[in-house]
Image (cartoon, rainbow, N blue to C red):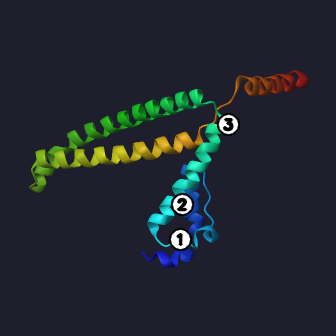
């Protein structure tokens, strides 16, 4: 991959991926002065941190830490359950590898290691995405919305 051809990359797809995960848009004009892929990664990280710092300015620190903790625990629970289901399916089907003249134990160890590595990558990506997308709604705002819904409901009767 030649970094000098950065303008020719599919920036629409790249931006879509970055925005869906980190809530950041990258303009090609902003990165023309960069020299390498590492500098691009650093630039994207800096932009994501700017966004997150704005979020920290709006949401009280204690509340934000609680939200982060909830997201991490919920995501670990969800991903771990899926991982265990995958491991059960692997264990049930691993015996078939013996028919292919492969040692089922070695295959199981190898596949389970790969599953765990995939779990860790998926876990990190999902936690980051959920933390960046998290929004906190105050009770006041919720009550205001609820009041509007009730008012609209009462008007229709």
Image coords of residue 142 (percent x, y): 73, 26
Q: Residues within 10 Å of mark 1 (few under 14, many from 20)?
A: some
> Is the C-beta separation of discs 1 and 2 under 8 Å?
yes
Cα distance, mark 1 to mark 3?
31 Å
Cα distance, mark 1 to mark 2?
9 Å
Mark 2 — residue?
43
Image check: 107 left or right of 89? left
Task: Identify the residue at horizontal 67%, vertical 36% (top origin).
Answer: 58
Mark 1 — residue?
34
Q: Quadrant of the C terminus?
A: top right
Classify 2 as above or below 126.
below
Badge 1 marks a residue whose secondary structure is: loop
Badge 3 marks a residue whose secondary structure is: helix
Q: Which quadrant holds residue 101?
A: bottom left
Cα distance, mark 3 to mark 2?
23 Å
Task: Identify the residue at horizontal 38%, vertical 48% (top origin).
Answer: 121
Work out whether mark 1 precedes mark 3 in sequence or the reverse, and give the earlier one: 1
Image coords of residue 44 (percent x, y): 54, 58
Image coords of residue 60 (percent x, y): 63, 30
Task: Identify the residue at horizontal 47%, vertical 41% (top origin).
Answer: 127
Image coords of residue 150 (percent x, y): 82, 22
Q: Residues within 10 Å of mark 2 (few under 14, many from 20)?
A: some
Mark 3 — residue?
58
> Is the C-beta separation of discs 1 and 3 under 8 Å?
no
Badge 2 marks a residue whose secondary structure is: helix
Q: Residues within 10 Å of mark 3 (few under 14, many from 20)?
A: few
Image check: 107 left or right of 26? left
Q: Which mark is residue 46?
A: none
């Amino acid at each position: 991959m030649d970094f000098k051809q950065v303008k020719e990359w599919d920036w629409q797809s790249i931006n879509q991926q970055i925005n869906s995960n980190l809530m950041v848009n990258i303009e090609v004009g902003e990165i023309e002065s960069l020299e390498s892929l590492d500098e691009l990664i650093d630039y994207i990280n800096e932009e994501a941190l700017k966004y997150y710092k704005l979020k920290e300015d709006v949401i009280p620190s204690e509340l934000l830490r609680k939200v982060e903790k909830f997201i991490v625990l919920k995501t670990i629970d969800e991903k771990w359950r899926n991982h265990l289901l995958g491991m059960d399916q692997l264990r049930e089907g691993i015996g078939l590898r013996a028919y292919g003249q492969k040692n089922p134990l070695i295959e199981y160890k190898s596949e389970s290691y790969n599953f765990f590595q995939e779990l860790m990558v998926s876990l990190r990506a999902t936690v980051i995405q959920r933390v960046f997308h998290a929004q906190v709604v105050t009770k006041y705002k919720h009550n205001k919305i609820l009041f509007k819904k009730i008012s609209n409901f009462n008007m229709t009767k």
